[in-house]
Image (cartoon, rainbow, N blue to C red):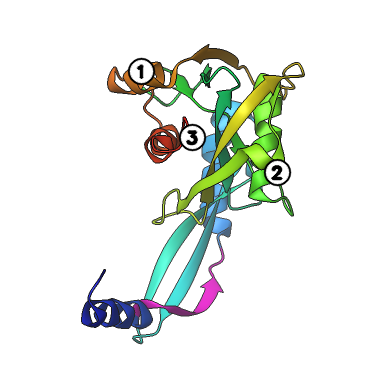
Amino acid sequence: MIRKEKLEELKSYIEEFKTIKCEKIDSNNLKTKLQKVYKIFKNEPINKTFIQIDRSKYYLNNGKNIIREKIVKNGSDGSAAIVLPVTKDKNTLLIVEPRVFTKLGVGVGFPAGYIEIGEKPINAAKRELTEETGYVTSDEDIYHLVSFYQDEGCSSAYNHIFLAKNCEKKESQHLDDGEFIKYFECTFEEALELQNLGYITGSNSIIALEKSKSLIYK
């Protein structure tokens, strides 16, 4: 257990750096610059892009102020739900999809997707599981493992990881236009080996594997 005096010291630092006021900065100049660059490749206005930048000045409790730029995804913070599925046969499901910014250009991991406005994270996890694999789970068989910020320096996205047990194939995949996903079944040990071999490299999937180790066969 953490010492009381160390906890109080930490709390004092947190209080010192708290934001007490936030002012949006006019981003028209930044938007214009991005628009010119984007038009070169897509010939579309920047307000039609998926990712935008929100620039603001933040006033801290210690009397200082800082300017920060936040990533906004499709008008929201980009919070996501990730689910590690376990079938009735005690195997896990992995998905494979294009991830063009990675070295391989392809990602191997677990079903995941953005949480819709007003949607509960657990419902988003169940929805993404079914959409990407056609598998379903019950409310009694899905467990919250951990929540965390994806990138505190430039995003307010707060991700939620779930473990879904006793998953059954009930439907076909329901993929969006431009979404390409294959899924395959393997043992949990094989999934861990795929991480060690460098196939599973996304932080969401690595955290899901680590957090589920003690629960996977219970």
Magenta stretch, overall SS:
strand
Q: Secondary structure at mark 2?
A: helix
Along the polypeptide, which appears first: circle 1 or circle 3?
Answer: 1
The residue identified by callout 2 is: 123
The residue identified by callout 1 is: 194
Does 92 lie within the magenta span? Answer: no
CA neighbours of label 2 inside 10 A, class few (<14), some (14 to 19), many (20+): some
Q: Is residue 120 above or below residue 208?
A: below
Does 25 lie within the magenta span? Answer: yes
Separation of disc 1 and disc 3 at Cα?
22 Å
At 28% across and 22% down in the image, what residue appears?
A: 196
Separation of disc 2 and disc 3 at Cα?
23 Å
Amino acid at circle 3: Lys
Q: Quadrant of residue 213?
A: top left
Q: Secondary structure at mark 3?
A: loop
In the image shown, does 212 or 157 lie closer to the viewer? 212
Separation of disc 2 and disc 1 at Cα?
28 Å
Relative horizontal placement of residue 43, taking residue 82 as reference (left or right): right
From this viewpoint, is residue 200 visible? yes
The magenta segment is 17-26
Farthest front residue in view: 218
Amino acid at circle 1: Leu
Amino acid at circle 2: Asn
**Which image quarter holds the N terminus?**
bottom left
In the image shown, does 125 or 44 lie closer to the viewer? 125
Expressed as whole percent of the image width and height from the top left, the position of residue 142 reads 61, 39
Expressed as whole percent of the image width and height from the top left, the position of residue 119 reads 72, 50
At 49% across and 56% down in the image, what residue appears?
A: 70
Q: Is residue 149 above or below residue 13?
A: above
The residue identified by callout 3 is: 218
